[in-house]
Image (tube, rainbow, N blue to C red):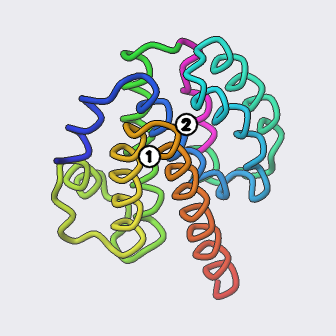
Amino acid sequence: MSLLELIDRADERSLAAAGLACLDRCLPLLAPDGGEALRPVWAAVARGDGGAWGEAVAKARVELDGDAGDDEAARLVREMLGAAPAEWAEGPLREWASGCSATALALHGRYDGAGGAAELVERCQAGDADGAGPLLAGELRRQHTVLESVTHGPTGLRRARELSTEGGRVLRAVVSRRARTA
């Protein structure tokens, strides 16, 4: 099943987890030590608490607003956070999760040999990863696994968080390596 199909079939909690996981994995591009700001948002997802979700997202925006990232990648991550809906409803969450998916894939594609071409991102989301570099392919697998895992309740959400932590470490290492060789 393609990533787009998984997003189309997901419920509120799965959509919130999928979008948040993408944001969490890309957060090192904005704030290398900013992961703690998303902890209350993850807790709201775990509880399926729409009221706590809106408050936690607003608080994370404030906490991460002053972070130094000012390049295009940091701007895109900031936009992902800014686009997080305050409303816990399928429509807004689906739109956000889909946008976060595309942005995360494009950002990962930039840092490997694949480039961040929009057509490649669209193909990856539709299920065709031909031409994707290793970083982009890894992000695609993580997104797919998150959406499949979250349907299994608390254990699946824990797996989603583990994948986000792992993905964030991978991206942080790639960016750090590039900075050293530049």
Residue 25 at what x, y percent from top left?
Answer: 57, 54
Q: Position of residue 14 (x, y in %)?
A: 42, 32
- Image point 21% across, 64% down: which residue? 129
Instruction: Name the residue type under label 1.
Output: Thr
Left or right: where does residue 26 sit relative to residue 19? Answer: right
Using the image, determine if residue 84 lies above or below residue 79.
Answer: above
Residue 35 to residue 170: above or below: above
Q: Which of disc 1 and disc 2 is earlier in sequence?
A: 2
Q: Name the residue under label 2.
A: 80
Q: What stretch is highlighted in magenta?
A: 77-87
Q: What element carries label 2?
A: helix
| Residues marked 2 and 1 touching at CB (< 8 Å) | yes
Residue type highlighted by circle 2: Met
Task: Give the vertical position of 128 relative to 21 (above or below).
Answer: below
Between residue 158 and residue 119, name the one nearer to us.
158
Dot 1 corresponds to which residue? 103
Image side of residue 75 versus residue 125, left or right:
right
